Amino acid sequence: MEPDAVVAFSPDHLNTVFFDNLPSLLIGIVDEFSGPNDGYPPVAAKTLRSDPALARHIFLATLRADFDPARSESLIVDHSLLVPLQIMGLDPVVVPIVMNVLAPPILSAARAHAFGTAVGAAIRSYEPDLRVLVLSDGGVIQEVGGPRIRPGRPDGTPDQAWLAHVIELLGAGEVERLVEESTPQRIAEVGNAAGELLTALAMLGALGTSPAPELIEPEPEIGHMFGVWRAEEGG
């Protein structure tokens, strides 16, 4: 796809930020950042270039849209943001947006989607005109270290029906319905890490439309999915 920049909505697993300083939304305004800071073995340590001018533009635009993101000018991220880039073989310029979707109270699905919409509007209003890939990462039905983990594993996937339902709605382009159904109660029921779905809702908000995906592939065993969406021309 040869993007000029990647804007990445990513969860954090209490590695980059912790309870002593835990913003709901955090935008990295940095020349570069590194990771992973959690020593996740499958992910190679690396330093990524960023675009502080684009990041600052997104930060100010979302403030004007009545959101209250924190900002960081020194950032080390955990494995979550790096995994999809490694899978895709990309080494791009990345603007990192870290979302607290794991430590309650978390954002509502509607708020996450609306924030993504504001980020998308900021990207479109930015000069120069860039080819931007919007990325989200995280699981859909994961339980990590809780009572619903699988024997001999640190995690579990306790609600396969929810994963199938999410994929069905996304496949039909019914993002607004998914936002409505992704209540805090429903998310809590399907896994203590299931709030990571909110990063996908933010990404879809940034697209500015509710298109059906070009590709969507579930990974039921680990509670994930892979999806590809393309914004409309000029979007």
Image (spheres, rainbow, N blue to C red):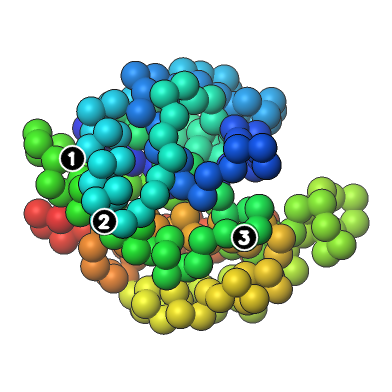
Say the numbered circle drawn on residue 65.
Answer: 2
Q: Residue at x 34, y 63 (%)?
A: 114
Q: Nearer the viewer, residue 52 or 62?
A: 62
Left or right for 13, reference 130: right
For marks 2 and 3, the one nearer the N-term is: 2
- The amino acid beneath tag 3 is Pro
Q: Secondary structure at mark 1?
A: loop
- Residue at which label 3 appears: 105
At horizontal 30% and vertical 48% (from top left) the residue drawn is 63
Asked if marks 2 and 3 touch (Cβ < 8 Å), the reply is no
Q: Earlier in the sequence, mark 2 or mark 1?
A: 2
Q: Secondary structure at mark 2?
A: loop
Residue 221 location in percent, x, y?
Answer: 69, 60
Q: Is residue 79 above or below residue 111?
A: above
Image position of 12 with respect to 157: above or below: above
Which residue appears at 69% of the width and 26% of the height? Answer: 39
| Residue 82 image position (x, y, % from top left) | 51, 33
Check disc 1 and report the residue beneath it: 131
Residue positioned 64% across, 76% down in the render: 185
Residue type for callout 1: Arg
Tell me, yes or no, if residue 221 can be seen here.
no
Q: Which numbered tag is attached to residue 117? A: none
Q: CA distance from mark 2 to mark 1?
A: 23 Å
Eyeballing the image, is 37 above or below 113? above
- Residue 227 makes an appearance in the image: yes
**For numbered disc 3, what is the local secondary structure?**
loop
Say which amino acid is labelled 2.
Ala
Q: Which dot, 1 or 3, sits closer to the camera?
A: 3
